[in-house]
Amino acid sequence: MRIHRLEEEVIRQIAAGEVVERPASAAKELVENALDAGAMRVEVELRGGGIAALSVRDDGCGMDPEEMRLAVERHTTSKLREEEDLQRVRTLGFRGEALAALCAVARVVLTSRPSGRAEGYMLRLEGGRLTQERPAAHAVGTSVAMEELFFNVPARRAFLQSPTAEARHTLAVLRRLALGHPQVGFFVRSEGRGVLEAPPVVDRRARAAQIYGRALADALVEVELASDEARLWGLFGTPEAARPTRGDQIVFLKGRPVRLGPLTRHLYAAYERYLPRGRHPLCLLYLELDPAAVDVNVHPRKEEVRFRGQGAVGDLVHGAAVRALGGLTAPAPHAGGLPGPSNWPQRVASPSPTEPGPMYRLPHLDPGDRPWRLLGQTSRGYAVLEMEDGLEVLDPHAAHERVLFERYSGSQVPAQTMLIPVEVVVPFDRAAALERALPRLAELGIVLEPFGRGSFRLSGWPAPLSDRQAKLGYEAPVLALADVLLDGEPPNEELWRRVACAAALKAGERLADRELLALIDEWKACREPGRCPHGRPVVVPLSWGELERKLGR
């Protein structure tokens, strides 16, 4: 086989594949260009999940015809001048490939007008080839209208997901960009419907309210910390606002949203004792540091970065998270060792044994009928049982999940109608998935109806769980349901797992002895008591023989 030069068209398509993976990456590149152009208003519209059509319109500085012709060529940019600029990247896009890549694999109409010109100009490109150009009416700013993504690369088009799934990915990208730029108005339409209307706001919490709803945004804990290397301003969710995925953990560098990457362990070192396995903290971290201390080229799509002095930045994240959780000390990831009794968390006071709270009331066996004895509950909420052949350390949260799951899954659950419906707001990129599942949720006793962009009116909750959920709030379980529904059409059993988890005891929550005994009685009667509905162990046994071996008896 002889070495030969590739055709220019093939080169363009290969290069485009490195930049444009799906409609979401196209939207990201176009919106970043708009923001770098100084836009204060960005409008995005999707059709067919962005595969059939995707358009981005901004009111930024615009381009004249000569700049437009240059912009659709590879490796052209206004954001870098010399090699040293790569060490101090201050913009969102900088590779000079976005427009050229899109034009290589789609049909694109680029229209722009800079300030000071009476009219705009339009370029039409197809598969990277300029097919038409002419003057065109346009306000100051730029519009990019893309149609039929990968029309000329059928192999890549075949790997795209359904329009619904591609829209989900694109809306998630837009959510992160909107959170990073609260001073910019974001207006998004999908399939002809408005899914986000977020006018410019003065601060980051106000933007979080536009995305997540006022109730959740008001509950976020604001922390600001600084060191010699960096300054961090963060919004942290409480343990009760934990998510089923890491999708709401974002670091913003000059508005650029990136994954936590190596900083993740510093965050979880603070949160891990408060969250059950499978739950993840919500945090929006706005980090300011010298651009020269950040390498933005470690990820091909710029979704992760590397910090110079990463340990110091990690300590800043850890310290902010600890402060958000109420100042309770927790070991940093590199510190090692165990916290002493003086700084163990005591977040929930134990009810008086003589006056049990209303959490858990069940008929249970007479103490004489039990082949076990409750020794007590630890400071972290675990229950310790003495058995004939050893000890058992029980997680009441996981046990309660198992009880609730087995008691009601597989049957149609009656709804407890609320006297006053509750408004629940979910992020706009999750709202469509939730709306499609409303009939299925009604079978579980969850009665929701659309109530404006991203808002739902909740008028019914599963009757057996309604009293407890009313005290805990409905935002977290509805968001958890929306998150799991994003991944397709999960069975009702999976949806009920989320409901059971939301209503179950929280990690570390303490019970009166009578309540704990009642819970253990019913848990031991379950069909599968060994694991919670998510598959996590409920109890850890320790035989007398094992204990004696460890103690050297």
Image: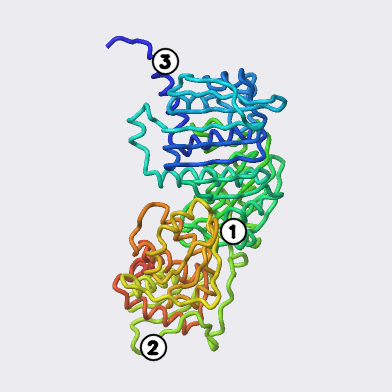
On the image, numbered disc 2 is attached to which residue? 367
Q: What's the residue at 44%, 66% (across, down)?
A: 501
N-terminal of the pair, mark 2 or mark 3, is 3
Q: Position of residue 506 (x, y in %)?
A: 50, 69
Q: Which mark is residue 213?
A: 1
Q: Nearer the viewer, mark 2 or mark 1?
A: 1
Q: Position of residue 435 (x, y in %)?
A: 44, 58
Q: Which mark is residue 8?
A: 3
Dot 1: few (<14), some (14–19), or many (≥20) neighbours within 10 Å? many
Quadrant in which the C terminus is drawn: bottom left
Can residue 553 be seen in this snapshot?
Answer: no
Q: Quadrant of residue 163?
A: top left
Residue closest to the eye, 156 or 303: 156
Disc 1 from disc 3: Cα separation? 49 Å
Cβ–Cβ below 8 Å for labels 1 and 3? no
Image side of residue 305 versus residue 496, left or right: right
- For label 3, the SS is helix
Residue closest to the eye, 335 or 299: 299
The kind of residue tagged 3 is: Glu
Quadrant in which the N terminus is drawn: top left
Image side of residue 312 versus residue 189, left or right: right
